[in-house]
Image (cartoon, rainbow, N blue to C red):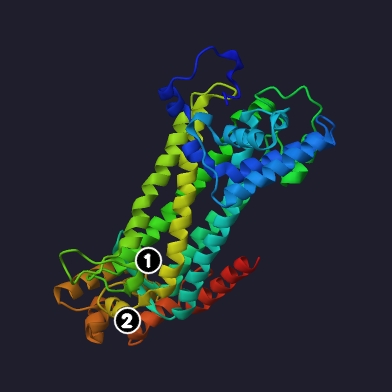
Amino acid sequence: MSKLWGGRFTKETNKLVEEFTASISFDQKLAKEDIAGSLAHVQMLGECGIIPTEDADKIKDGLLAIKKMVDANEVEFLVEDEDIHMNIEKLLIEKIGPVGGKLHTGRSRNDQVATDMHLYLRTKTTELIKLIEDVQQALIGQAKEHIHTLIPGYTHLQRAQPVSFAHHLMAYFWMFERDKERLIDSLKRVNWLPLGSGALAGTTFPINRERVAEILGFETIYPNSMDAVSDRDFIMEFLSIGSIIMTHISRFSEELVIWSSQEFQFVELDDSFCTGSSIMPQKKNPDVPELLRGKTGRTYGNLIGLLTVLKGLPLAYNKDLQEDKEGMFDTVETLEGSLKLLAPMIETMTVNKDVMRKAINNDFSNATDIADYLVRKGLPFRDAHEVIGKIVLYAIQSNKFLLDLSFEEYQGFSPLFEDDIYEVLAPEHVVAVRNSFGGTAPEQVEYQIKLAEGKLQR
């Protein structure tokens, strides 16, 4: 068969042009969405009397037969047929004859491809929300086990104050909760129907776009046909959200890499999520979190790529927009793979509580509590800060930690110290007294876990 649009042309397409402009190598991922959109379109055409009902039924049967072939991986998509739309339409005409050509009545590939991508992202966004919830559930599971497990909290990667390990883990829960909310909110813009906009100006046929929206489950119809065929904001938004999700995954992965190192030994990743060295038999490499960290870059690239494609495009459709799909597919697949690995990796990691506790005993992360102690005794905070700075310097020079100093040594710095200073400096006390809402005290951590569980139940 010659090309479906070939009537205007006197020469065959140059083979290099054919290969360069074809998108079937990647947009075949949209086969099911393309068929779903076509089924809704032809149903509307029949109901509106734009084509005979018997023709609509015949086209519908042909499309359903092709869908079965696609599901069974029995279709060979051809480069010479350019894209998924032309491939399926040719298959349809081959299967049911010339009546298959009536399917394209009242539509263009421009509104067709946009519809396909809206359908695709709607499905994938919903699936990604569930995968994020799996990660959140894994974080809650570990957090429940470690409300009273203490870990050094860091700022500038320097030990700052001890915190509950559960509190540290739950920080990532809330990051992912915001990611989930962004995805949920984006569905409002994904769920716009472009079909019926034609190439850019609408159609002369008396179509019923509301009926197509009803069949396909779209909440909104694009009110401007030029915007409908050229809008890729919904993909940009998805790529942006995907990049933020991968940023959070990368930050957590970085902590897993650090925590599982010989220098920290705070956690041990399950063997099933690590690999070995080809030359050093003692090695256990955290390859999964390293790759999660590394794959973040490709999602950033996909976002920047689409932003760059779109920044200079006049209305309405331009062939440049063919470049919108590969990055979208890649980010979807990167997110799916990353989230599917992250949840079980969190669930199966071993937490070395004793090592974490030893680290807290051998630092000065309880120093702030001495300052608060002196402030409660009436000393201005800035004066207290200076006193504590001198105490820490003295302890370092004496090769001691704050709990190692004698009562006499404390009183040498200030007569306000009493023997209850050791209770104040105990790590459990340091954590427990931070009982403000959102703090690291066990009571507050238990409360935020309940809040988190409530979010998941909704």
Looking at the image, do the residues carrying marks 2 and 1 touch, with CB atoms under 8 Å apart?
no
Q: Mark 2 sits on what residue?
A: 417
Q: Residues within 10 Å of mark 1 (few under 14, many from 20)?
A: some
The reply to whether residue 70 is in sight is yes
Residue behind mark 1: 381
Of residue 428 and residue 166, the one placed in the foreground of this image is 166
Choose between 168 and 123: the one closer to the eye: 123
Residue situated in front as seen by the camera: 324 or 419 = 324
Q: Position of residue 208 (x, y in %)?
A: 80, 34
**Is residue 189 among the parts visible in the rendering?**
no
Q: Residue at x 68, y 42 (%)?
A: 63
Amino acid found under the numbered disc labelled 1:
Phe
Q: Can you tell which mark lies on residue 239?
A: none
In the visual, does 371 lie left or right of 93? left
Percent across and percent down for residue 85 are 60, 34
Q: Is residue 53 above or below residue 6?
A: below
Q: Residues within 10 Å of mark 2 (few under 14, many from 20)?
A: some
Please indicate whether residue 303 sits to the left or right of residue 360 in the image: right
Residue at x 61%, y 24% (from the top left corner): 4
Residue 62 at x, y = what percent? 69, 41
